[in-house]
Amino acid sequence: MTHHGDALRSGETALKAQLPENAGLSFVGVIHTPFKTRDDCPRQGDMEGPDCTIELDPRLEPALEGIERFETLEILYWLHKARRDLLTQSPRSDGAVRGTFALRSPLRPNPIGTSRVRLVARTGNVLTVRGLDCLDGTPLLDIKPDRCGYTVQAPPKPAG
Amino acid sequence: MTHHGDALRSGETALKAQLPENAGLSFVGVIHTPFKTRDDCPRQGDMEGPDCTIELDPRLEPALEGIERFETLEILYWLHKARRDLLTQSPRSDGAVRGTFALRSPLRPNPIGTSRVRLVARTGNVLTVRGLDCLDGTPLLDIKPDRCGYTVQAPPKPAG
């Protein structure tokens, strides 16, 4: 994503100093989408949109045990091409400036994206899902059952 | 959070080798909740629950510009006491074992928590919210408008 390179648009502000790093992330897989450029990416994911695949590091495949029970998942990923220093932004070049935390823009101090997706299929360490809006090749951070699905799900019945 | 120290419960499995670190996170504030121990934490946040406060790094206060327009926010935080190597878990010691990615347990390769909260008030760099379930002192990673609120929100009317 190039956004607007290093140049700030009118009204935009950036942090002067870089924030320190306090914790480390491990990429646990890679996301494949049909979106090859930032302009291809929809503004927000659509659970009726195109199939995308989440390819988990095969060493972590046991951590998918039971995932098929959930129709809706929450996916976290690393927006690896985003600049991190913007405090206020004008994403549409229309002069409207808003704070970074009042936007879902990828440009943020910790560029973590979150999406709700529909789980279509699982084959081993690969999930087919709908609802992602990120670039092809985006690093995967986490997969969680969606909060809502998690809440309403009936507890497993005891055997016998 | 101690979970069960380093001992695995029956059926639990862990990664043998530590995953590499691929990206760095910056803590951008601290979350204050009434939950002082893991046992105090609710299983899931409740938007009618107790007031909690999010204290943003004052240098980032400009990034809150316009946040009051949103009733519901998504909060990301770092579950700083969680072990990261579990592939399968038995969170309730009831013998039921599930994959880490089929649970919202704090114990995961990238221990990032996400919550939807109701914004109650803002005073400068401090937000009062309801709906968090994390420990007092949890490091803040990100604040975003909630997806749903973001979608239905009407575009701002041009002045004049």
Image: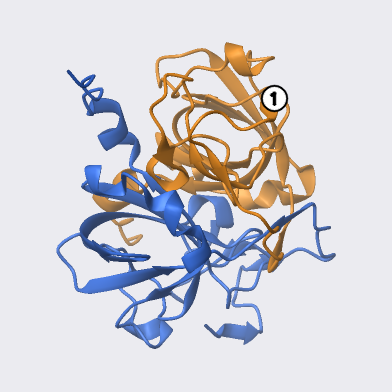
Chain colours: A orange, B blue
In the rendering, at what x and y percent does residue A73 appear?
Answer: 45, 39
Q: Secondary structure at mark 1?
A: loop
State the image coordinates of residue B109 (x, y, percent, origin top left). 66, 59
* Residue that appears at 61% across and 33% down: A8
Q: Is residue B16 left or right of residue B78?
A: right
State left or right for residue A146 relative to residue A51.
Answer: left
Asked whether A65 or A87 is in front, the reply is: A87
- Considering only vertical position in the picture, is A7 above or below B106? above
The amino acid type of the residue labelled 1 equals Thr
In this view, A134 is above or below B57: above
Please state, as top left, top right, bottom left or bottom right, where the C terminus of chain B lies in the image. Answer: top left
Q: In the picture provided, is B54 more to the left or to the right than B15?
A: left
Most foreground residue, B40 or B25: B25
Residue at 54% across, 64% down:
B28
Which residue position is annotated with label 1?
A2
Q: Position of residue B44 (x, y in %)?
A: 31, 63
**Residue neighbourhood size for the residue with mark 1, other residues' Cα within 10 Å, grouped as few (<14), some (14–19), many (≥20):** few
Q: Quadrant of residue B118?
A: bottom left
The answer for which chain carries disc 1 is A
